[in-house]
Amino acid sequence: MQALRASARSRAALRVALSHYVANGLSVAFGLLLISGGVHVFMGPLAAAAAATGVIVASPPDLAAPRRGKFLQMLPAPLIGLPLFFGVQLVHADPLRLGLVLVPATFLAFLGMAWGKRGIPIAIAVTFSMIFSMATHAPTGIDEAVERTLNFGLGAALYVVYATLANLALNARYRVQVMADIVFSLAALMRLEARQFMPRDEADDVRKTPASMLGQLLRQQAALADQLQGARDIVLESPRTPRRQKLAGMLIAVIEMRDQLLASELDLDALRAHPGHGKALAEMRGVLETLADEMTALGDALLLGRQPAAMLDRRPQLAAIALQDDGQRKGHAGPTTAVLGRGLASRIGHINDEVLHLVALARGDAQPDLALVRANWQMFVSPTAWSLSPFFTLWRWDAPPLRHAIRATLAIATGYVIAVFLPWGSHDYWILLTIIVVLRGSLSQTLERRNSRVGGTLVGCVFAVGLLSTHPSPVTLLITVTVAQAVAHGFAIRRYIITAVSATVLGLVQAHMLYVGVGPTFALFERIADTLIGAAIAWAFCYVLPSWERSQIPALVARTLTAQARHARLALGLGQLRAVDSSPELEWRLARREAFDSLSALVQATQRSLSEPRAVRPPIEALEHLQAHSYQLLAQLSAVKSMLVLRRDRLTPAEVEGPLARTAERIEALIGATPTTGPSMPESGSATALTGPIPLPDPFDNDISPWLLRRLDLATGIAAQLREDAARILQSLDDERLRPA
């Protein structure tokens, strides 16, 4: 057992070592070493230290990215940071004037977060330019300030060029690594789904609370939705070569597999409640776990550059699963559990088919659908041009980016005042650096950063003090900074505690290099005290002009319902019944992405709200119900779409065309607009407009139209529940808003 665990840990470590974020961190570190080392050789250690600072400031936006737009993504940080670095140099010796530069510049820098994920690293980089300028000793005159700024600008400019070229050179590798990362995430989701395939009495330990497993599934789906957009931007960009087309086809296949996986849990509860199906469920679970292992092996092969092994078809194994009939009378309106079990096995069979197709694409045994690949490139890749619209839309008092900019500015001002009056004020920049890296837009993110920052700083300080006490040579310091930069940059998003340790070493050693010729003048306990003060200030200012998640919930609920209604309308369209038309299919794929993305945003906001004070939390229970019903509606519609695409030869168009259209209209009427009043019961009646129960024959020997009609009725019922959930959420928020203080 210990050997297996050790082997699993070594494989996990190898996957991390071969991942795109580690490759990106190594690329950044190599650029730092190349530029600072070259400047050191030709211009000396002082110039090299300033140039290295320019590299560090320019590097936060340097992430694995598409080739198109990379230069424009890198350019804003040094363009804005350079004059701020120079401004701090000019007023370095005057605390009052320095504060008058720091405070308004921080406000302007944090407004960059209005651009979301693209703006956050730029905002951080700009503030770094001021803080690292503070870390130098005060210039003796204007000439030294200009020289130091020019060296800073040289390092930043060279790094922008380097980062653009490095991203171009690594683009092919990034595509493979990002694709492998998505495959691993989907394999993890498959294993989580497989955990549900056990009898209810055996699953009680993980499902005592019904929402427990569903909550994990929703969080995993939300994380996968976030990953997928980043993967689309890189993998689907310019698929002009056979290798790129293969990877793009694999990504599209993974997205289709997510739908099949979503539909796999339909009718599962009925089987889990039947004691005679324990063995069958265990066999289905085994197949799902085996398919997850195949996916993991495929991801490993991609990372290692190997040809994936051919995969065995598991459909014969699924067909051999024995299902016990529950004894219902023949002709009974409700399906027997044996029939439901066969349907469930069939849906797992569709997942098997998708994994087979994915492996065949990776091996080159199958060719991607080039028309679909090109359509996805044109429609699903994020724009790279900068737009001014976020700047013009943030000037509302309740806009989170504006409130966060004000909050960060006040925190920096407070931290600076405290730092000036501390007895060890010569290292005031460390308090400000801690505030910048800890303070985030939400309380949950700030708390996570606070804990990691404090713990990481303690460890990093010990490392840095131990290193500097040996009076290392400039070359040793340069190598240390390079390694620390690689680790800090590579794990900034994945594991911040590791970044905190490395960033502490990086910051302290870089500051020491800027003080060339001066001994390490900081004490361990002073540095720890600076960190604790900065973390405490960041934590305290989370409660100043807070953007509690409840203020965003109405818009997120409205977005979720609108996206679900549009997805339902397009998923139930008749295009697949009549012909495979790429135009409606592309529109449906866009709607499907928005349905998943909107649900992901709602899940993440709800999760973040759990860290907020109880008095300001949104109605968690109602939100969980809405998320669960949204998830179930997506599952039902995925099953319907599978019938229309994969088994339309078993459908009778005359029987299903009318119900499909009526169901789409009914769902649109129920959730197309967010309810503005309290709960109200929708009109009763079947969306399929049939009288009496729908007879359900064996779906493997007969026409499956009745089964499609059953899915339509279930989807309509779930849409009605979604409307009720939304009404309860909005009513609760209104009641809280109107309640006297």
Image (cartoon, helix red, strand yellow):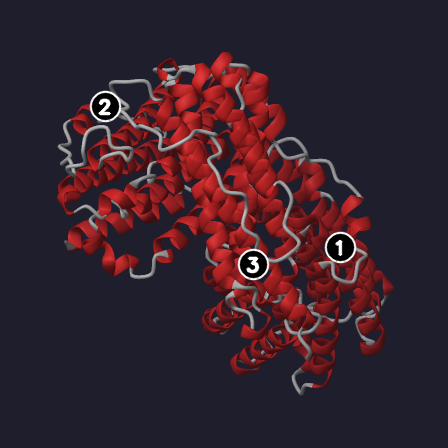
Identify which residue, 130 or 219, lies in the foreground: 219
Please, what secondary structure does the residue beneath circle 1 have? helix
Under mark 1, the amino acid is Gly
Task: Give the Cα distance between marks 3 and 2.
Answer: 47 Å
Circle 2 residue:
313
Image location of residue 419, percent across then percent down: 69, 80
Asked whether the beta carbons under mark 3 and mark 2 sit within 8 Å of each other, the answer is: no
Circle on res. 559:
none
Query: Disc 3 or 2, which lies upstream in sequence?
Result: 2
Which residue shows up at 15% across the image and 47% down it? Answer: 275
- Please, is residue 726 above or below residue 662 in the view? below
Locate residue 554: give its quadrant.
Answer: bottom right
Circle 1 residue:
81
Asked whether the beta carbons under mark 3 and mark 1 sit within 8 Å of each other, the answer is: no
Under mark 3, the amino acid is Arg
Which residue shows up at 69% across the image and 73% down it? Answer: 544
Q: Is residue 322 left or right of residue 696?
A: left
Asked whether the beta carbons under mark 1 and mark 2 sit within 8 Å of each other, the answer is: no
Image location of residue 389, percent across then percent down: 79, 44
Question: Is any atom of residue 512 visible in this view?
Answer: yes
